[in-house]
Image (cartoon, rainbow, N blue to C red):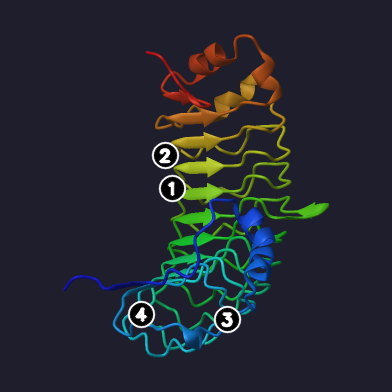
Amino acid sequence: MAEQRMDVDCQEESEESGDERRKERPVLAEEQGQDMPVDIGSIELDSDAEEVDLNHCRIGKIERFETLRNVRVLCLRQNVIKKIENLESLTMLQELDLNDNLLTRIENLNALESLEILDLSFNSLRKIEGLERLSKLKKLFLVNNKIVKVEKLEHLQELEMLELGSNRIRSNRLTKIEGLRFLVNLQELYLSHNGIEIIEGLENNRKLTTLDIASNRIKKIENLNHLVHLQEFWMNDNLISNWNDLDELNNAKELQTIYLERNPLHQDPQYRRKIMLVLPWVQQIDATFVRI
């Protein structure tokens, strides 16, 4: 039977970034004379839908979803939701998108044991919590929150993708790679735009194919020689100055893409040539493909 989808076109979606959307949303509502938030009861839901998209509907509270008997994908992106609640009946849910809301805590997710994808990016979360029962989770997005510590992920042993880019609170930010010991199936790790100074804590993440630690404060490439399946390595906008550091990637024979621009190394006139000498199998250096 064909999968049934329900889309609600609440407002025209902006092409601006998440931060810009959040700043503009109240202004738009005032200009249009609309009250915020709206009652979800005013939105007609298809009880048979397997995918429900309520993107940018100015929903203020999660409620009245008990009739969604078959829903597997629920998108509540770009609303004004302050609390995760009233999802206990959605036991078949596999994907939940709460990107760009007003959440401050991860909570009330214990009933969603079938969940595989969870997006809580662009909120105001201060810590990782409330995920203990989500043992089937494969992708977790926590971009642009206020998280300063990677913790309480030990139960997510099926996790394949973890996105923690742009987590910072003024002078405080994510400064250490930790809490990943039990994520033995992790394949993609994104930690860009934080305050990380040392590459560490990845000893058990041997399946990593993508590692993004761009825009941090790292001075040395180290503790990576066990990542033999690495295919993409994003290390641009750091403080790498020693060419010998590239030897740490000698075991990564599957490496295809490496970004090192805007490190001190980048100022070397022989920058690209030296990378190719150490890593001759690389196919792309920064945004430019290698000529064979």
Cα distance in 3D space between marks 4 and 2: 33 Å
Q: Which residue is mark 3?
A: 38
In which quadrant of the rendered image does the C terminus lie? Answer: top left
Residue type highlighted by circle 1: Lys
3D distance between C-alphas at marks 4 and 1: 29 Å
Amino acid bearing label 3: Val
Identify the amino acid type marked 2: His
Dot 2 or dot 3: first in sequence order is 3
| Label 4 with label 1: CB-CB less than 8 Å | no
Read off the residue under disc 1.
Answer: 207
Which badge, 3 or 1, is on the more N-terminal residue? 3
Tell me the crowding category of disc 1: few under 14, some 14 to 19, or many 20 or more residues within 10 angstroms, Cα based.
some
Q: Are there few (<14), some (14-19), or many (20+) residues within 10 Å of tag 4?
A: some
Secondary structure of the residue carrying numbered label 3: loop
Sequence-wise, the earlier of marks 4 and 1 is: 4
Mark 2 touches mark 1? (CB < 8 Å)? yes
Quarter of the image for the N terminus: give it.
bottom left
Q: In the image, which is nearer the foreground, mark 4 or mark 1?
A: 4
Would you name the residue on which mark 4 appears?
A: 92
Q: Percent from the top left, x then y, of residue 291?
A: 40, 14
Residue 229 image label: 2
In front of the other: 13 or 287 = 13
Nearer to us of marks 2 and 3 is 3
Specify whether residue 282 is in view.
no
